[in-house]
Image (cartoon, rainbow, N blue to C red):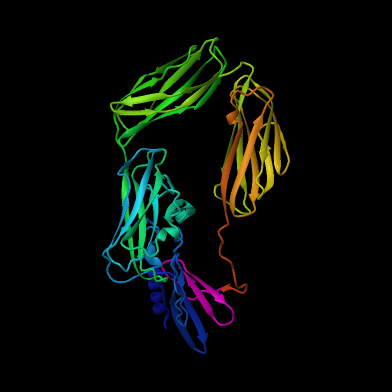
Amino acid sequence: MQNDELRQILSFIIHHSAFIIVFMSRINRVKLAIVALFITACGGVLFTNNFINRPVGAFSAGPPAGHTGAPSEFTCDECHLKVGTSSGTFTINAPQSYIPGQTYQITVTHSSPDQTRQRWGFQLTALDGGDDKAGSLQTAGDGLTQILDNQGPGSSRQYVEHTSAGTFAGQHDGASWSFQWTAPQQNVGPVTFYAAGNQANNNGNSDGDFIYSTFVTALPATDYTLTLTPTARVIAPGGATTYNLLVAPFGGFTGQVNLSLGVLPAGVSATITPSVLNLTDASAQSATLSISTTVAAPLGTITLIPSATSGVLARSAQGTLTIASPSSADLAVTNTDSPDPATTGGNLTYRVVVTNNGPAAATNVNLTDALPANANFVSATPSQGTCSGTTTITCALGSLAVNASATVNVVVTPQAVGTLNDSVSVTGTESDPVASNNSAQTTTDVQAPVAGPTLTDPNLAVRTVVGGLDQPITMAFIGNNDFFVLEK
């Protein structure tokens, strides 16, 4: 075979698929065998000089993630072999529109008059316009569905699917599953629910099943949200403070929004500036909630519930104002993790922030971090003060002025796949008027690291066989038998 002919063959292969090409030289003759390698998430079929077909198994306890028919995903027919034409239907009942943060019931339904259909299954995911996870799925707690988190393409999607009990083995005419979906906290545009389903014959194998896929889309409702920030303030009697009120339209909402606040106790007064917002486009608008107190204002925590109304639409937010002794100091702590999910043997960082909300300066501030058992301590770095310990970290952070913060970065290495729970708490010398924010916990999913390619033969060498192809290729020489591998 001439080089030009070989070049044409290789160029054709590279443009149409990923192949393994084997060259074996034996006495003046080149033997060319072109082998196609097909791998799916359901199982593989291995092709050799002796054709071997490995049977593919069904997943009665729920399929692997990534089988909903969504972009970059398969459907159930990657594993189940379809036969003939089905008379059944497969549908998703989901809201046509959504309000950010609201929870809705989703129902997936199989229906078939075919009495040979005796087992049922499905998998569903919810994605935004960028094909990223949209909102959060939750089971109904009936044992018929289960959740797969941080899986599928990019290990970033969420799925709900049947359990073994949820296949309704032996049941005729159809099946349905109901579960909950909480919309994203912000308007993310259209959300599409993708699902694939199986109407199986219950023969214990993957043949003779009817596979379906479908999708429905929910659009953002014409509405707006009201947000109060911060959600908590602490002042002494006679003091004053401010909050920010943000009205964010979505779904094309425009119009006038009126802001108000409910009745406050004696000694406490409030004003909202401006009290009316005129939304003319997709841009959010804000107002300032100012609160002042007299020296006679009673100590304690007040719940603030500002409202935003526009015609029949009414939205509210919630926060608190704590009126505390002038000598007290409200210490608050937060704990966040990165990355999440983490990998075994890799670094996981807990970022712990301690803030003094006042009204007095805080002294002798101490932070305690009880590290999870399946994590090895690496380091603890405070922005002020010192830290000690390896299983329980204790940090002496000194003093914090009103509204000042101190940060501690704690680095650990997870040792096992699973879940890590890290708990932190903070104390100071002064009395603390808000005990509920003195501790925090964060939960981290830990996964095994993704295995990279490994060199199985240390005696590999590279040899150029054909040049001039119109895209990069690699030829690897293995052993003494002139065995080459071409990778696209």
Query: x%, y% of residue 121?
Result: 39, 60
Outermost residue to the right: 388
Q: Is residue 470 among the parts visible in the rendering?
A: yes
Residue 300: image location, x then y, percent: 55, 19
For the C terminus, which image quadrant?
bottom left
| Side of 353 relative to 306 (left or right) | right
Q: On the image, which quarter does residue 399 sit in?
A: top right
Residue name at image x 31 percent, y 29 percent: 313
Magenta stretch holds residue 162: no
Residue 7 falls in which quadrant of the image?
bottom left
Residue 433, above or below 452: above
Does residue 436 appear left or right of residue 119 in this picture? right
Give 218 or 461, whichever is nearer the viewer: 218
Judge by depth and name the residue closer to the eye, 229 or 313.
313
- The span shown in magenta is 462-488
- Would residue 466 be counted in the magenta stretch? yes
Expressed as whole percent of the image width and height from the top left, the position of residue 1 reads: 42, 83
Q: Could you tell me which residue is drawn at 56 percent across and 61 percent down?
A: 451
- Residue 466, can we see it? no
Kindly indicate the quadrant of the structure image that contains residue 34.
bottom left
- Above or below, 60 against 10 in this view is above
Residue visible at 41% across and 18% down? 272
Q: Residue furthest bottom?
A: 27
Image height of 119 relative to 136, above or below? below
Q: Where does residue 53 sit, x and y in percent of width and height?
A: 44, 77
Q: Which of 268 and 378 is in front in this view?
A: 268
